[in-house]
Amino acid sequence: MSKAAVVQAPQDQAAPPSSLSADFAPRVVRWQRSHGRSELPWQNTRDPYRVWLSEVMLQQTQVSTVLGYFDRFLQRFPSVADLASAHEDEVLGLWSGLGYYSRARNMHRCAQEVVARFGGEFPRTAAQLETLPGIGRSTAAAIASFCFGERVAILDGNVKRVLTRFLGFEGDLASSANERALWNLATQLLPAADSGEDMPAYTQGLMDLGATVCMPRKPSCLICPVGTDCQAQLRSEQERFPVKTRKLRRTSQSIWMLVARDAQGRVWLEKRPASGIWAGLYCLPCFDNRDALGASIPMSAGDALDDAPPFVHVLTHKDLHLHPVIWKASSNKSQLSAGGAWFDEAAWQGLGLPAPVRKLLTELNA
């Protein structure tokens, strides 16, 4: 295949060269059925609840991390109706440690809408699924393909890498026009219209290729089922794709955290606002500086105030420099502020807490 076959045009009507697309889907399907992953608990099922739950959890999170959370969620919420009827605090508590907590809140809202709008049954088309909270185009397509055999394309991060390399797609995916063009190409590469039974294997195959073969670094091109026609491999430019130039600027923030303990050893926690960092989670009181934290404490004789060692918590695009200040009250205190309460260890363990707060409290109680 010559370099001229590379797909460069960003137009919505761009089409993959027929010589590239003719056998792409059948090869992916055959490979998946022989060599793809099949051992994960959300595979080999057409239960949309399990597939949806896994798709949400796997966003920005590794499979190894998701496995334990997936099992615990199913044990506590075996059906979408069980999840819909739960209190949000319990959902966030089970989610605690997975990060990106908006996923958990949207997941809870989605379950409630599935019950309210669709009688507890997930809709069967990607178009309807996409109307639900937290379900984007690719997630909707994955559910519809896996569970209902709909002929619809997915385009998550792994699949973008597979397709842009295979096609040699030059468009910068920082551009929405180029992203639309890639969606169009992904749709044209789907199995034939009369191959509905192939859709689950094809969709899973693309995911498996991106996760196990077409890796970001040092891809295993020799065992790739479509490697002989992969434009990136033919040009020895695998790591150049996908092309995406826009990068978010990394920032940092310093936060002082009050670890307030009363005479019974309980810790004071407040629920965060509905927007912003750690939205909706229970958290230690946070301040922009040490003076503001100190001014908030109703100190009494016999109280102790100590600065603990600061530490850094890394988010996707921000470094949080956290400064814990431990206040040990010599007697029981009343409410410190609105929206908070005192919690003993058994109680706060079950709350939705930011990962660094849970880690800090666990270490202090060790």
Image (cartoon, rainbow, N blue to C red):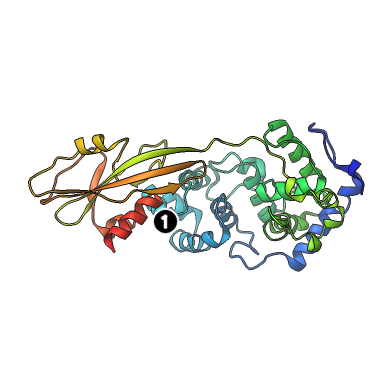
Image coords of residue 95 (percent x, y): 44, 54
Image coords of residue 102 (percent x, y): 47, 43
Q: Amino acid type of disc 1?
A: Leu
Residue 259's place in the image compared with 344, above or below, is: above
Q: Is residue 300 left or right of residue 118?
A: left
Image coords of residue 331 (percent x, y): 10, 51
Label 1 crowding class (10 Å Cα cut-off): few <14, some 14-19, many 20+? many
Q: Element at badge 1?
A: helix
Residue 355's place in the image compared with 102, above or below, is: below
Q: Quadrant of the C terminus?
A: bottom left
Residue 347's place in the image compared with 139, above or below, is: below
- Whether residue 152 is visible here, answered yes or no, is no
Image coords of residue 213 (percent x, y): 72, 60
The one of 222 and 35 positioned closer to us in this rendering: 222
- Whether residue 355 is visible here, answered yes or no, is yes
The one of 82 and 254 positioned closer to us in this rendering: 254
| Residue sitting at x 73%, y 54% | 206
- Residue underneath mark 1: 94
